Amino acid sequence: MAVVPLASKIMGNGGEPLVVLHGLFGMGDNWASHARKWGENGMDVHLVDLRNHGRSPHVASHTYADMVEDVRAYALAHFGDRPVRWLGHSMGGKTVMSLAVHYPSLVERMVVVDIGPKGYPPHHQEVVDAMHQLDFSTLKSRTEADRALEPFVPNWGLRQFMLKNLEYKEDGKLGWKFNLPVLEGQTGRIGEALKPHDRFIGATLFVRGLESGYITEADWTGIMQHFPLARLESIPGAGHWVHAEQPEAFQEAILPFLLEG
């Protein structure tokens, strides 16, 4: 498989690295406010854009095997073969888990945000359908795009997350930063489970939003089979976008774990 050179934004002052991987339809810059706080605590934060997202290249394949090789190449280029800290949300969390079980020597510790190792059925179709409602031949601004999306996506926060991915293309018209056709065509793969015998015996923290449902009490036995040293932090009043919905509680939950390393 061809490795994609990943774009990133690095925030910090030369401290110990923390690599952050965003979720589906996101990008590294979604994590900038948290990265500033981690930088204040002595970390060099690498906000990575995964393939088909942000400023990273658009390619035809989008699997976890692809993404693991991409981030492995990124790690080797920036840190050599030494272990570092990783954090991943949703699709990025599944990528971090897959990296840890296949290349454990690269993972000193990891935080997995609101995703488990189990399989998830495709469930992003409503968001994808809403994206298709935008007619970029007529929309002139993000404000107009926001108004056009509102009937299909009433949640203001989710709309802002989506709109952050709009950019002006070479023809002067708005368009998505991510590779929507490929991501839409491979959403079934985004929910794939880890293999039954995949294991990482290292420091692991799972963080869930209690309003989310992505990680339930019944999931914990399965999580421990893959990650026997795992711990769990639960954030009240947060759904799937835990870090955006309860940012202070999220920081308090994970900072001590990150600083243990």
Image (cartoon, rainbow, N blue to C red):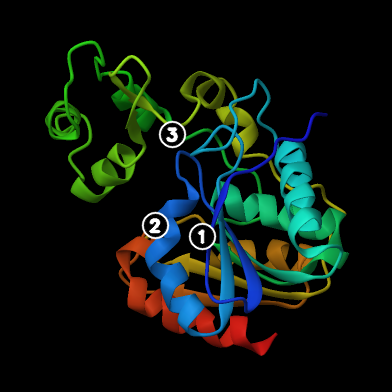
Q: Crowding near pointer 3: few (<14 within 10 Å), some, many (20+)?
A: few
**Amino acid identity at mark 2:** Trp
x%, y% of residue 124?
44, 34
Residue 140 higher or lower than 229, as above or below: above
Q: Secondary structure at mark 1?
A: loop
Mark 1, residue position: 114
Mark 2, residue position: 241
The reply to whether the C-beta atoms of the residues labelled 1 and 3 are less than 8 Å apart is: no
The reply to whether the C-beta atoms of the residues labelled 1 and 2 are less than 8 Å apart is: yes
Of mark 2 and mark 3, the one earlier in the sequence is: 3
Q: Secondary structure at mark 2?
A: loop
Residue 225 higher or lower than 72, as above or below: below
**Amino acid identity at mark 1:** Asp
Mark 3, residue position: 124
**Amino acid identity at mark 3:** His
Residue 82 higher or lower than 155, as above or below: below
- Quarter assignment of residue 210: bottom left
